[in-house]
Amino acid sequence: MAFLNPTSFFSSTSKKLSDFLSFSIILRKFTTEIFNSKKQMNSHKPKQWLRPQTAAKAVPFLLLLTLLLGAFDSATPVIYIIGDSTAANKDTTEGRIERGWGMCLHEYLDDGVRVEDHAVNGRSSRSFYAEGRWQKVIDKVKPGDYVIIQFGHNDEKPAPDRHTDVGTTFDAHLAQYVIETKAKGATPVLMSPVVRRNFQGDTLVDTHGAYRLVAEKVAREYGAVYVDANAITHDIEQRLGPDGSIRLHMWVEPSKYSWAKKGRKDNTHYNIYGAHVVAAALAKALGDAVPALKSHVRKIKE
């Protein structure tokens, strides 16, 4: 299991301190300029503040402030999420209640990290890469960032543009994401796919087969962090049982919503409550797996 390099961590911390000191010096100069200009206003020269010369003096400081604020934002580690519909951003118009767990993850982390959810409905490890979606993500990734990689649901399906095979193409695609992430100085986090709600009697039965095991194998072979989202969500669903687990998913009564007039019984995708339950559990697991992120995980009352 690969963790954040201490050398790069302290280097990043030193850079942030240096940026902060630079910011403080420039802010002091800028506020002094404003103070002096206000003094001129108070000394019976009200038009001095509005003169073009005074405004021109302020422009460089404002530009520097803007640049520094941007630098602070860019220095903040980003957690990128790539994956399928179980993590993806959803349409929330017209009272829609479907959510991907990735939409909610930021609520269980503090402001010391940012989350960007790039997961998309219906994508597999193959199609996400082939459609150029990965390129848009990796182009933004910088040293100190994290990339959560979670596929499997659609890799299992027979469609040729999505299907991958365990032991060959599925492994290879996950490995490629890991390799490219590490090449950018970021930390790859492989997650196994979340479970489907598939009870036989009182027992939750797996539907992913060998696909649920590949993320762990690739993480071990290529030095990525591994989070067993499959086991975590299995425990959540099993604990709630056949009836209670319905509350996590997109079970909608007919005619209750205009966007689901015929109703819906979906045992894969999450509603608002379900996405929050899963996001909270995965945030905790992420903090346990990555020491550098542990302090950023918000404490949730059980």
Image (spheres, grey):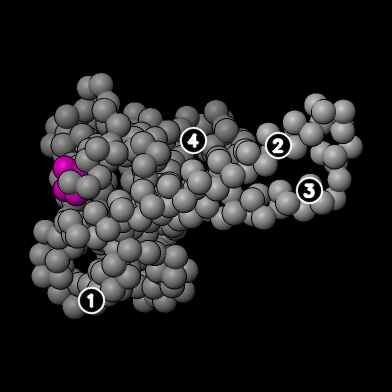
Q: Is residue 281 above or below residue 60?
A: above
Measure how far apart labels 3 and 2 are at the Cα level. Answer: 13 Å
The label nearer to you, 3 versus 4, is 3
Q: Which numbered disc flags the more N-terminal residue, 1 or 3?
A: 3
Residue shown at 42%/60% (left/top)?
122
Q: Is residue 194 above or below residue 161?
A: above
Up/down of 38 relative to 23, above or below: above
Sequence-wise, the earlier of marks 3 and 2 is 2
Q: Residues within 10 Å of mark 1 (few under 14, many from 20)?
A: some
Q: Position of residue 47 (x, y in %)?
A: 89, 37
User: Is 289 a magenta residue?
Assistant: yes
Residue on which disc 2 sits: 36
Name the residue that disc number 3 marks.
55
Q: In what element is the residue under mark 1?
A: helix
Between marks 2 and 4 in the image, the one whose residue lies nearer the viewer: 2
Cβ–Cβ under 8 Å for marks 1 and 4: no
Q: Give left or right: position of 231 versus 121.
A: left
**Residues packed near mark 3 inside 10 Å, few (<14), some (14 to 19) or many (20 plus):** few
* Residue assigned mark 1: 172
| Dominant SS type (magenta) | helix
Front position in the image: 123 or 48: 48
Q: Which residues are magenta?
A: 286-290
List the residue tagged with mark 4: 97
Q: Where on the picture, by quarter, is residue 158?
A: bottom left
Residue 253, horizontal then vertical, whole percent: 47, 30
Earlier in the chain: of badge 1 and badge 4, it is 4
SS for callout 2: helix
54 magenta-colored: no
The x and y percentages for residue 212 are: 17, 57
- The residues tagged by marks 1 and 3 sit, at their Cα atoms, a distance apart of 58 Å
- For the N terminus, the quadrant is bottom left
